[in-house]
Amino acid sequence: MLVAAAVCPCPPLLVPEVAGGAAAELDTARDACADALGVLAAARPDRLVVVGPAGRDASYPEGSGGSFRGFGVDLDVRLGRGGKGDTAVRLPASLAVAAWLLDRTGWADAPMEGLGVAEPTTVERCTRVGRQVAGAAERVALLVMGDASACRTLKAPGYLDDRAAGFDARVARALADADVEALKTLDTGLARELQASGRASWQILAGAAEGTGLRGTLLYDDAPYGVGYLVAAWS
């Protein structure tokens, strides 16, 4: 059963070494992510599942390795501190950021695994996977990685799209209210057009949270660099 969830953005720029001279611009987002992970730890889960966007659907056991070398930084990470994962296996960028966040906060509260989810995954499959994840242990926590739209300003990766702010506001309200139905009914086509990488991850959260009565708190909502970054905690 799902007992807690944290929702965090997944730009590699969250890692100060990747951000370089602009690192301080995301300090508030990093602090919010740390607060959200604190909520997960306080729930004392038996298992932590880390979900994030990836090029293909894949599972990653604890101990799997990731790297930021592709972003010009000689920095490797590992998903958790134990497990038998192959450190030669490359975590997708979203899970590498998650691994960095977990290491930064000193996570040692429960065994974990990673789950990469491809953008085309349907709502029905996302919610089904969420239910399966929630049923994997008596007390399950989710770390849900993903960005909102990438079209909030003229300099955004997806350029300016007038629909982006409204889409992000809807997601923010759903996360703040722990509104499972609102997440399930997000427009998948619009999310794709707005380059919102978190859509599938959020809908996995929706499936996992069905019937749990969890309450949400929105900890961060901003769009630096024209990309919507949201941090929330459900408990």
Image (cartoon, rainbow, N blue to C red):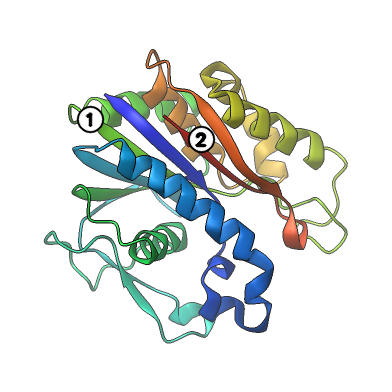
Q: Which residue is the site of mark 2?
A: 202
Placement of 35 over or under 18, stated as above or below: above
Placement of 80 over or under 229, stated as above or below: below
Give the amino acid at mark 1: Arg
Give the amino acid at mark 2: Trp
Front-most of 40 and 200?
Answer: 40
Placement of 211 over or under 187, stated as above or below: above
Q: Which residue is the site of mark 1?
A: 139
Label ID, residue 39: none
Helix, strand or loop under label 2? helix
How far across and down, in percent of the image, does residue 59 sit? 27, 49
First in sequence, mark 2 or 1: give its number.
Answer: 1
Residue displayed at 66% across by 83% down: 21
Look at discs 2 and 1 and give the one toward the viewer.
Answer: 1
Placement of 42 over or under 175, stated as above or below: below
Residue 10 appears in the figure = no
Residue displayed at 65% across by 33% down: 171
Where on the picture, by quarter, is residue 205? top left
How far across and down, in percent of the image, does residue 53 sit? 47, 49
